Amino acid sequence: MNRMETLLEKANRLPLLPGVYLMHDADGTIIYVGKAKRLKNRVSSYFHGEHLPKVAAMVNKVADFEVVVVNSEFEALMLENALIKRHNPHYNILLKDDKGYPFVRLDLREQYPRFSVVNRPKDDGARYFGPFGARGATFDILSTLQKAFQLPTCARRFPRDIGKERPCLNYHMGLCAGYCRPETDAAEYRHSMEQAAMVLSGKSGELKAALKAQMEQAAEELRFEAAARCRDRLRAVENLDHRQTVIATAFADTDAVGFFRGAKTGFAVLHYVAGGLTGKDFSLLDEPLEEDDEAVSRLVLRYYSARGTLPKTVLLPLEIEDRAALERLLTEHAGHPVELLVPKRGDKAVLTATATLNAREEVQRATTQMQRRSKTLEWLQKTLELPGFPHRIEAFDISNTGSFGIVAAMTVFVDGKPLKRDYRRFRMKEVTEQDDYASMYEAVSRRFARCVAGDEKFAEVPDLLLIDGGDTHAAVAERALLALGLTLPVFGMVKDNRHRTRALITAAGREIGIAGNQAVFSFIGTIQEETHRFAIEYHRSLRSAAIRSTLDDIPGVGEKRRSALMKQFKTVKAIRAASVEELQAVVPRSTAQAIFDYYHQEETSCE
């Protein structure tokens, strides 16, 4: 009995009950998680008959499976969602974390909580709002909130810094309530933070009603100062309503979902507030295993599971089998009723049609970009006479300045796009003097030695290796590979007098011009610039650390004086060689003497 017959026999023994199934490969890794109303019918369908190419590819890797039987389709949906989040199976639909859209974090367990912007929420007991729009716009909203509620924006920490210094300018300008003063009340601070949180939660309407009631009550009781404070805060909240375009997408009352399957799969969500479009989110995915209805169901669940606020209504482009269970799960997550509708006609049907049109347009645009990148890579393969299509390209550059160490940077481009998670940095261990060739040999050797040793972080082998430099640099890289028993296509990137890559060159010195093909010229130039940037960035970070490690140890030298010294003398070596009089031109005499003594204490002790 072969593998497929064995798996089919096992599947046929499953019950006709709802549950979740987990597909394992030969290594025991979970490669796919699914749910079913009837486990026997669904799981057995994988092991007989013909399938779409991607489904067949997954099934060919299945060595075994396990199931978890549950009581209802709703429980199956919850368990499936939890297992996919935990295992991130290769063949499941996995949305990125809102394309880097930020969340606002607030921990009300602290005595004096503050807002902060984070990339993704954690299970740490704090409250998270969002995700919102671009980071800059989110910071702008927080700044507006802080002014509206007179919250501190300074670096002081409470209660540690209360009463230590006079209130800053923001207090005197009426932008902060001055919580650094000893007479302020922590309860008043918390009350203001809770009101600001109501705005971020989409409850500005409730807040305005409460402020209006408080204002009227204070006026009736002749507490005119309190009434004026409520009035000012009410106006600030009303003014904030007009600036909430970044928040509106999180507080939409209706979302329209679009789905399109082409060369890639597009998933779009349009956000509407009171009938007006306020924002759009979009994800481009590889073709899912699931049929369209199940794919839409899973995408909707993944998308809204990551969001802090959900709309009242979500319009779907097609009917889904588990709509009732999904509706219930989203309602529990949102804390308010969430209705899933599949409009067939009228204005709502127009919204879903618009969302689907957006999904299709994004797929077609991305496909065009992919085609352009593919043509560029095809030209590279043909012109460089590569043995295979250059899916993965790795590039190396050396940064070597002064006495702050020698570093190498490795960037990675996959199918013409940078893959930053695979970027690597190397600080030279064997090379101690400025020698670009020896440094390149060490960097390439260390990268591919890790590959040969089976290190998973270096397991991928590139189809093309690009080295910043000429034929000698390329020859050094080739020699490092041969020493490890590897043979890969290696080319140097030759620059013109404007520091742009004008040609590629082999280790034997054969030069291949690329200036005649604008797409290739631009692509190789991008790789060279990105690799150089990455190397310089690493080198600067080491240089800054070296500066801090010496100057910051000297009494009287803070950040401003350190910057002034570096601006004047350029290097720590020059500062060390300066006289007290020369140092005194930049810093006070006592500090100049301290710097001189610090760098000359060894000489003094030897005398």
Image (cartoon, helix red, strand yellow):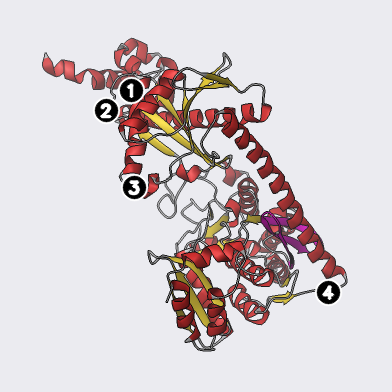
Estimate the x, y position of residue 263 in percent, counting from the top left. 68, 54
Does dot 1 land on a helix, a strand or a loop?
helix
Amino acid bearing label 3: Asp
- The first of marks 1 and 2 along the sequence is 2
Q: Most prominent secondary structure in the magenta stretch?
A: strand
Q: CA distance from mark 1 to mark 2?
A: 9 Å
Q: Which residue is mark 2?
A: 430
Three-letter code, disc 4? Lys
Q: Which residue is mark 4?
A: 344
Q: Is residue 445 visible?
A: yes
Indicate the position of residue 563 as horizontal and vertical percent values: 43, 25
- Whether pointer 3 and pointer 2 mark residues with C-beta atoms closer than 8 Å, the reply is no
Question: Who comes first in sequence, dot 4 or dot 1?
Answer: 4
Residue 115 horizontal/vertical position (percent): 54, 55
Q: Is residue 123 visible?
A: no
- Residue sitting at 30 percent across and 13 percent down? 577
Residue lying farthest to the right in this orientation: 346
- When the figure is inspected, residue 425 is found, relative to residue 206, above or below; the finding is above
Q: In the rendered structure, find residue 438 and report the number of the disc placed on it.
A: 1
Amino acid residing under circle 2: Glu
Write the start and end of the magenta stretch as one range.
253-282
Q: Mark on residue 315?
A: none
Asked if labels 4 and 3 touch by Cβ distance under 8 angstroms, the answer is no
- Foreground tag (1 vs 2): 1
Callout 1–callout 2 Cβ contact below 8 Å: yes
Query: Picture quarter containing residue 215?
Result: bottom right
Q: Is residue 582 magenta?
A: no
Q: Which residue is mark 3?
A: 455
> Circle 1: is it few (<14), some (14-19), or many (20+) Cα within 10 Å?
some
Label 3: which secondary element: loop
Q: Is tag 4's residue or tag 2's residue first in the polypeptide sequence?
A: 4
Q: Most extreme residue toward the front, as rendered?
A: 1
